[in-house]
Image: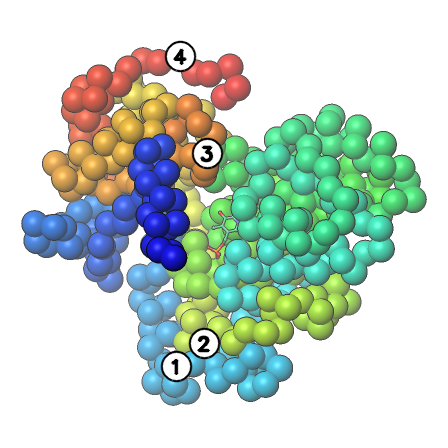
């Protein structure tokens, strides 16, 4: 039997649908964010990264790099096992205390990624609630969808950020049924924000538990970087907050924070926590340094918002199709997978600008886009050069300028 044919056929399907993905071979340069080296087929080139989720450049912050090096030098690299066996180490314990404090919760629990925290966190929580009904936002991230699926309980999807629809479903479920509302605070493909206050009102009125993914908001919103829930003054009303250490905190790992008993139960029952090696001490120390820094420093947050606002203003003034966004995300509408990929290739090859195309299944077909994430370190000159490059690419690909926004935006 020629097993290879199955895999080649699968790859060919992706090529046919223009969904085959190619990764650029990049090397970041510590201290020169957002500049990087691209190991292109024709040799090394300097490029500017415009799509990193290291939103604040903390992955290169001297305090963060310093903490990682210092800890690795002092205690070595790996954790030495699962938490149960030999993996619970001091930097990890300190990090969990830091995260609980960040969110004003009794406890927190670390996982090897934000993906795992959603997948194993949501499924474990829901399995521990008898006859649980999960109410999940239609645009939730794949890691949450997997968590909901693996929970194996009843689930209903409410229209994206539609609290009236959520309320209908809560009423229909009845007061006696245990209900878990699962949503994100900031949706990173459109840059829109969930009405967390209203969701909390409904959860309290109808007796539901709340689980909110703050992956794209922690570090960046709220006076101490606690996220949108902190900014909106509702952090204490949300039962479980989930976040990542891999985006604004510039490291790796995911976590949930909540009441001590909830966290202890997940610690005790979640397979994706129990059966995998703990995060290395150096990563934990680095993450703690990033969180501590952002608890007191507002410079990064303010400058980040300023850069995002300027990028939106400059691109919009140039007639480029900036989609409406309430946050630091700057989506640029393309609406065609082939042209989206071509635009990304042209930007990289001819302008030294790296912006990954966002195609189906990450976003709906027909809404393909370039997703731009300005950081505190994208200076005026870089923004102006970006606008100029985009205009040239738009011309080359015959993409429309001064487009009318979609009704849904
Ligand atoms: C990136 C992302 C995750 C996963 O976090 P990682 O730490 O990268 O695994 C979870 N939820 C959302 C909404 C994300 O965008």
For residue 46, side relative to residue 143 (left or right): left
N-terminal-most mark, 3 or 1: 1
Using the image as rendered, state which of residue 355 and residue 120 is in the foreground: 120
Q: Which residue is drawn at 66% across and 49% down?
A: 148
Question: Eyeballing the image, is 163 above or below 187?
Answer: above
In this picture the colour scheme is: rainbow
Using the image as rendered, state which of residue 245 and residue 219 is in the foreground: 245
Residue for badge 4:
404
N-terminal-most mark, 1 or 4: 1
Mark 4 vs mark 3: give the one in front. 3
Residue 5 percent coordinates (x, y): 34, 50
Disc 4 on helix, strand or loop? loop
The numbered disc on residue 280 is: 2
Residue for badge 3:
363
Disc 3 versus disc 2: distance between alpha carbons? 33 Å
Disc 4 versus disc 3: distance between alpha carbons? 20 Å
């Amino acid at each position: 039997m020629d097993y290879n044919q199955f895999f080649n056929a699968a790859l060919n399907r992706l090529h046919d649908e223009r969904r085959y993905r190619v990764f650029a071979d990049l090397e970041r340069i510590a201290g020169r964010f957002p500049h990087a080296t691209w190991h292109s087929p024709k040799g090394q080139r300097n490029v500017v990264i415009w799509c990193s989720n290291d939103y604040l450049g903390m992955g290169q912050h001297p305090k963060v790099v310093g903490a990682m090096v210092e800890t690795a030098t002092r205690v070595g690299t790996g954790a030495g096992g699962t938490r149960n066996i030999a993996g619970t180490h001091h930097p990890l314990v300190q990090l969990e205390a830091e995260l609980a404090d960040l969110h004003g919760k009794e406890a927190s629990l670390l996982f090897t990624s934000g993906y795992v925290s959603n997948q194993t966190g949501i499924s474990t929580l829901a399995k521990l609630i008898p006859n649980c009904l999960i109410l999940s936002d239609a645009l939730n991230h794949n890691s949450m969808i997997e968590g909901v699926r693996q929970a194996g309980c009843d689930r209903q999807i409410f229209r994206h950020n539609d609290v009236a629809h959520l309320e209908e479903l809560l009423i229909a479920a009845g007061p006696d049924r245990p209900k878990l509302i699962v949503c994100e605070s900031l949706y990173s493909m459109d840059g829109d924000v969930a009405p967390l206050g209203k969701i909390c009102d409904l959860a309290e009125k109808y007796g539901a538990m709340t689980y909110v993914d703050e992956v794209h908001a922690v570090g960046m919103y709220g006076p101490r970087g606690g996220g949108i829930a902190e900014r909106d003054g509702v952090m204490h009303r949300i039962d479980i907050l989930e976040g990542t250490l891999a985006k604004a905190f510039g490291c790796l790992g995911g976590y949930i924070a909540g009441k001590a008993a909830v966290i202890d139960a997940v610690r005790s029952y979640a397979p994706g926590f129990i059966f995998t090696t703990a995060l290395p001490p150096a990563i934990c120390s680095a993450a703690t340094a990033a969180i501590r820094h952002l608890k007191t420093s507002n410079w990064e947050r303010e400058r980040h918002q300023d850069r995002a606002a300027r990028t939106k203003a400059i691109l919009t003034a140039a007639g480029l199709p900036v989609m409406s966004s309430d946050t630091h995300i700057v989506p640029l509408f393309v609406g065609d997978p082939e042209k989206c990929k071509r635009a990304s290739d042209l930007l990289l090859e001819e302008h030294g600008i790296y912006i990954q195309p966002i195609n189906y299944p990450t976003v709906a077909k027909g809404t393909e886009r370039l997703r731009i994430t300005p950081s505190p370190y994208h200076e005026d000159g870089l923004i102006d050069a970006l606008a100029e490059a985009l205009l040239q690419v738009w011309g080359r690909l015959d993409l429309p300028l001064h487009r009318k926004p979609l009704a849904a935006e």
